[in-house]
C-alpha cells in the first residue's frame, strides 16, 4: 500500500512566512559561527589562546543539548523548546560580547549553542511532522537555499563590522537577531498535535536513542552526513588562517571567498529539488558523495604538489562544499523517514552527530596549532572524511543488494 503523504501546509496563506521562519531557524547556527570567522585571526592574538576552541565549544554544546531537546520536543511539542532555546541563545550571545578571555568566550559559546541547536533540529522534525519522505527532502532542500544566505551574508557582514568596530559588536548583533527571531515565533504553528506526542516520560524516551543506534539503515544515512560535516568544519575552522594568514587575503574580503561556496550550495540545492522528483534519494546520495570525495582528493593532491596557488584550494573546495545541501537534505530525509514515530529523537541524534562531528576537525586543527595557515592539515581532513562519507552510501547499496 502506498504511504499516505502528510497534508501540504504550504497551501495555507501563511506558507511563505512559515518557510522563512524555519529557514531562519536553520540559518541561525551557521550565522553563529560564520559571522565571526573573519575575526578569528585577530581574536587569536587578543585572547591569547587557541581560538579554534571557540568553535569546538559551540559544537560541544550544540551536540550535547540536542540529545536532551529531542525527546523533550516529542513530549511537549515543538514550539515551547524553540522559545526556551532562543532565550538561551540571546543570553549566550550577550555573554560572548562581554567576554575578555578565551575561557569566558568558550563557556559563553557553549551556552549560546545550547539555545541555537533547537533551531535546525526542530525545523527538521517539523518538516517530518508534516511531510513524507520525498516531499520532506524537497522542503529541506528549499530550506537549505534559504539558510545558505547566512554563510554568504555572515562573513561579509562580520568583515565590515571589524572595519568599524571590534569583534564584540558581532556578538551584540547576534543577540539582536535572536530577539527578532523570538518575536517572529508568534506566527509559527505547533506541528505536533497533542494526540501524536510521546505519552511516556521524557526519561523513558531516552531509550529511543539505543534503538536508533541499533538501526543500521538509519545509522548509515546518519554517518554519511556526519562524516561529510567533519570535512565541512575543517574548512570552516581552517579557512580563515589559510586565506588570511597563508594567502594574505584581507579579512574584509575573506567573506567573498567563503560565499563562493555557498552560492554553489544554493545552486545545487535548487537542482536537487528537481532531481528528487525523478530519482531515488539513494542514487542522488551516491552521486553527490562521490563528487564531494573527488573534490576532497583533488584538493589534497594540489596542496601536496603545491599547484595552483590559492586557486588550487578555492576550486576543489567549491565542488566539495556545493554538495552540502544535497547530502544534508537527502540523507536527513531518508534517515527520518525510517523512524517517523521517533522524529524528534531521531532528528536530535542526527543533528548531534552531524554538528558534533566538527569537534573532531576543530580539535585536530587546534592540536596541530598551525598559525601560518598552511592548507595541508585542512586538506587531508576534508579528503579523508569525504571518502568515508561516500563509503557509507556504497556500503548501504551493497548491503541492499545482498539482502535482495
Image: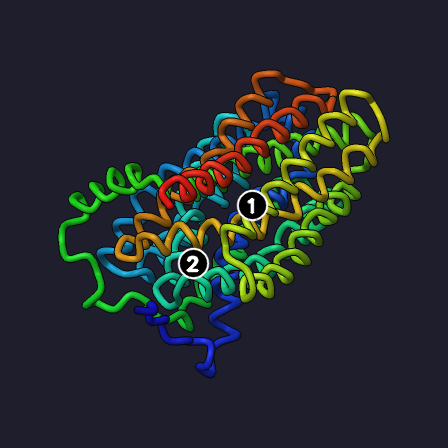
> Residue 349 at x, y = what percent?
36, 42
Mark 2 and mark 1 in contact (Cβ < 8 Å)? no
Instruction: Decide which of 16, 102 is in the foreground and name it.
Output: 16
* Residue closest to the far right: 308
Secondary structure under tag 2 reads helix
How would you rate the neighbour count of disc 2 (Cα within 10 Å): few for under 14, some for 14-19, many for 20 or more? Answer: many
> Residue 217 at x, y = what percent?
37, 43
> Residue 251 at x, y = what percent?
76, 38
Query: At 61% across and 16% down in the image, what residue appears?
Result: 368
* Quarter occupied by the N terminus: bottom left
* Residue closest to the far top: 368
Instruction: Write down the quadrant of residue 52 in the picture.
Output: top right
How would you rate the neighbour count of disc 1 (Cα within 10 Å): few for under 14, some for 14-19, many for 20 or more? Answer: some
Total number of numbered discs in the rendering: 2
**In this figure, which residue is indicated by the disc labeled 2?**
123
Q: Is residue 327 left or right of residue 377?
A: left
- N-terminal of the pair, mark 1 or mark 2, is 2
Instruction: Decide which of 272, 168 is in the foreground and name it.
Output: 272
Q: Is residue 130 left or right of residue 251?
A: left
Instruction: Write down the quadrant of residue 350 in the picture.
Output: top left
Instruction: Write down the quadrant of residue 286 in the picture.
Output: top right
> Residue 23 at x, y = what percent?
52, 61
Query: At 50% across and 60% down in the image, what residue appears?
Result: 140
Instruction: Decide which of 173, 236 is in the foreground and name it.
Output: 236
Residue 109 visible from this viewpoint: no
**In this figure, which residue is indicated by the disc labeled 1?**
286
Query: At 77% across and 47% down in the image, what residue appears?
Result: 256
Query: At 47% across and 83% down in the image, what residue appears?
Result: 13
Amino acid at each position: 500500500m502506498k504511504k499516505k503523504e502528510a497534508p501540504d501546509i504550504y497551501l495555507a496563506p501563511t506558507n511563505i512566512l512559515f518557510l522563512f521562519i524555519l529557514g531562519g531557524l536553520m540559518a541561525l547556527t551557521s550565522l553563529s559561527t560564520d559571522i565571526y570567522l573573519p575575526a578569528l585571526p585577530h581574536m587569536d592574538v587578543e585572547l591569547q589562546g587557541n581560538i579554534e576552541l571557540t568553535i569546538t565549544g559551540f559544537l560541544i554544546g550544540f551536540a550535547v543539548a540536542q540529545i536532551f531537546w529531542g525527546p523533550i520536543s516529542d513530549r511537549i511539542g515543538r514550539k515551547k523548546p524553540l522559545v526556551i532555546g532562543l532565550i538561551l541563545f540571546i543570553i549566550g550571545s550577550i555573554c560572548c560580547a562581554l567576554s575578555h578571555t578565551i575561557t569566558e568566550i568558550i563557556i559563553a559559546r557553549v551556552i549560546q549553542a545550547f539555545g541555537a541547536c533547537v533551531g535546525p533540529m526542530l525545523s527538521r522534525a517539523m518538516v517530518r511532522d508534516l511531510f513524507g519522505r520525498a516531499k520532506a527532502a524537497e522542503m529541506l532542500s528549499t530550506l537549505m537555499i534559504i539558510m545558505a544566505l547566512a554563510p554568504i551574508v555572515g562573513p561579509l557582514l562580520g568583515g565590515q563590522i571589524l572595519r568599524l568596530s571590534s569583534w564584540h559588536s558581532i556578538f551584540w548583533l547576534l543577540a539582536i537577531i535572536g530577539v527578532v527571531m523570538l518575536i517572529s515565533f508568534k506566527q509559527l504553528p505547533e506541528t505536533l498535535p497533542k494526540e501524536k506526542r510521546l505519552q511516556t516520560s521524557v526519561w523513558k524516551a531516552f531509550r529511543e536513542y539505543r534503538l536508533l543506534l541499533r538501526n543500521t539503515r538509519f545509522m548509515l544515512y546518519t554517518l554519511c552526513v556526519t562524516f561529510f560535516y567533519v570535512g565541512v568544519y575543517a574548512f570552516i575552522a581552517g579557512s580563515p588562517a589559510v586565506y588570511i594568514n597563508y594567502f594574505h587575503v584581507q579579512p574584509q574580503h575573506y567573506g567573498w571567498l567563503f560565499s563562493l561556496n555557498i552560492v554553489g550550495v544554493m545552486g545545487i540545492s535548487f537542482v536537487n529539488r528537481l532531481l528528487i522528483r525523478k530519482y531515488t534519494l539513494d542514487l542522488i546520495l551516491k552521486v553527490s558523495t562521490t563528487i564531494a570525495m573527488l573534490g576532497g582528493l583533488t584538493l589534497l593532491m594540489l596542496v601536496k604538489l603545491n599547484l595552483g596557488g590559492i586557486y588550487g584550494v578555492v576550486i576543489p573546495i567549491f565542488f566539495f562544499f556545493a554538495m552540502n545541501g544535497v547530502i544534508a537534505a537527502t540523507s536527513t530525509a531518508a534517515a527520518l523517514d525510517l523512524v517517523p514515530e521517533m522524529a524528534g529523537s531521531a532528528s536530535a541524534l542526527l543533528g548531534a552527530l552531524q554538528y558534533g562531528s566538527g569537534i573532531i576537525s576543530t580539535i585536530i586543527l587546534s592540536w596541530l596549532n598551525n598559525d601560518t595557515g598552511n592548507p595541508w592539515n585542512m586538506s587531508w581532513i576534508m579528503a579523508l572524511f569525504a571518502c568515508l562519507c561516500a563509503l557509507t552510501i556504497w556500503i548501504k547499496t551493497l548491503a541492499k543488494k545482498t539482502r535482495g
